[in-house]
Image: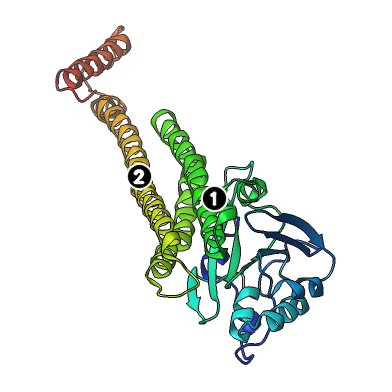
Amino acid sequence: MKTTSKIFGKRSEKVGLPPGTLIHVGEKKTEEVKITVIEYNEEHFDQRQLSAIEECFSYKNTKTITWINIDGIHNVENIQKLGDCFGLHPLVMEDILHTDQRPKMEDHDDYFYIVLKMLLNQKTPEFMTEQVSLILGPNFVISFQETEGDVFNHVRTRLATAKSRIRKMGADFLAYSLIDAIVDSYFIVLEKTGERLEDIEEDLMTEPSQKTLRAIHQMKREMIYLRKSVWPLREVISALNREDSPLIKDSTKIYLRDVYDHTIQVIDAIETFRDMLSGILDIYLSSLSNRMNEIMKFLTIIGTIFIPLTFVAGVYGMNFHFMPELRWHYGYFAVLAFMALVGIIMLIYFKWKKWL
C-alpha cells in the first residue's frame, strides 16, 4: 500500500492550470461509470439504473426525494454535464474530480458540498479508502464515488422499507444517513486494527523479529493516514450542526450531534492506538537492546575467564631453558588442571555475584 502518496496526494497534474479546470486526479478505479437513482417519499419508492447522465436531469425539480449515486468519477464530461444541470460551481466540480481532498463542508446557499473519506471493508488486514463527495440540495442528494461497492447498502435497505424513518424525512436526513454509514465503517476498521495490534504484541512478547518491526511501521503509517481522514470530519459534522440553513432541519441536527459523538469516539480510539504503537516500538527497541546486552555479557564473561588462562598459556609458551617444572613428566596435565580450576572458581564467583 502506497501510504506516502495517500498522505501527501498527487497534485502535479494540476500544476499551472487555471482554477476550475476539470481534470481527474487520482486512480481510475473503475472502467464503467454506474449511475443509480433512488426516488422516494413516504408512500413511493423507485430504484433504477440509468444508462446516460442526461437521464438524471429530470430529477432536479421533483416533489419526491431523489438520491443520485455516481460510481466512477474519471469521466469528466459526466461530471460537467451533471454540474451544469444542478448549478454546481466549477470549483466544486473540480474538487469532486480530485480524489485527495481533505474532508470539508462548503455552503453554497442553495446546496451543501461535503467531502468525506470512506474506508472500505476488505478481506485483507490493510484498509482501502476512497473519496466520497455529497451534494445536498432542497430535495436531492448526489453522491460521487470512485468505485462501485460501498458502505451504503444498509441505507438502501432502509429506504426500501415502507415504514422506515428515513422515508418520512427529507434530503438532509438522507445525507445524515450516508455520513453515519461512513462513520460506522470506521469502527469496523478500528476493530481489525485492534486485532492486528494484539498480534503484534503477542509476537513482541514471544520472538520479535524484523517482520514485527515492519508491521509496527506499517500500522504507524496507516494511523497517520486514518487520523488525517477522521480529524477534519469532526469539523465537517460540527459545521453542519451549526449551520442556520433551510436545507438542514432542526430534527436532523439531533442525529448529526450523535454522529459527532461517534466521530469523537473514533478519534479517541485512533489516538489510543497511536500511543500504543509508540509504546510497542519502544518495547521492541528495548528488547533488542536487552538481547544485545545479554550477548555482550556472555561474551564478556567468556573473555574474562580466558584472560588468566591465556596468561598461564603465555607464560609457559616462552620456552626459557631454566623455567620451573619445564621438564616435569606431569607438568602438562598439572597446568591443564590448574587452568580448569581457575575457570571453575571464576564461574562460581560470577554466579555468587549474580552476574550469570
Q: Nearer the viewer, residue 326 or 54?
A: 54
Residue 226, image x and y in percent?
A: 47, 56
Total marks drawn? Answer: 2
Q: Which residue is mark 2?
A: 276
Upstream in sequence: badge 1 or badge 2 = 1
Which disc is residue 125 wearing? none
Residue 161, image x and y in percent?
A: 64, 45
Q: Is residue 37 left or right of residue 130?
A: right
Which secondary structure, mark 1? helix
Q: Residue at x 49, y 77 (%)?
A: 106
Q: Is residue 215 left or right of residue 88?
A: left
Q: Residue at x 37, y 70 (%)?
A: 242
Which disc is residue 165 wearing? 1
Q: Looking at the image, can residue 282 be seen?
A: yes
Residue 122, image x and y in percent?
A: 63, 45
Which secondary structure, mark 2? helix
Give the distance between the C-alpha atoms of the residues marked 1 and 2, in whole angstroms.
40 Å
The quadrant holding residue 55 is: bottom right
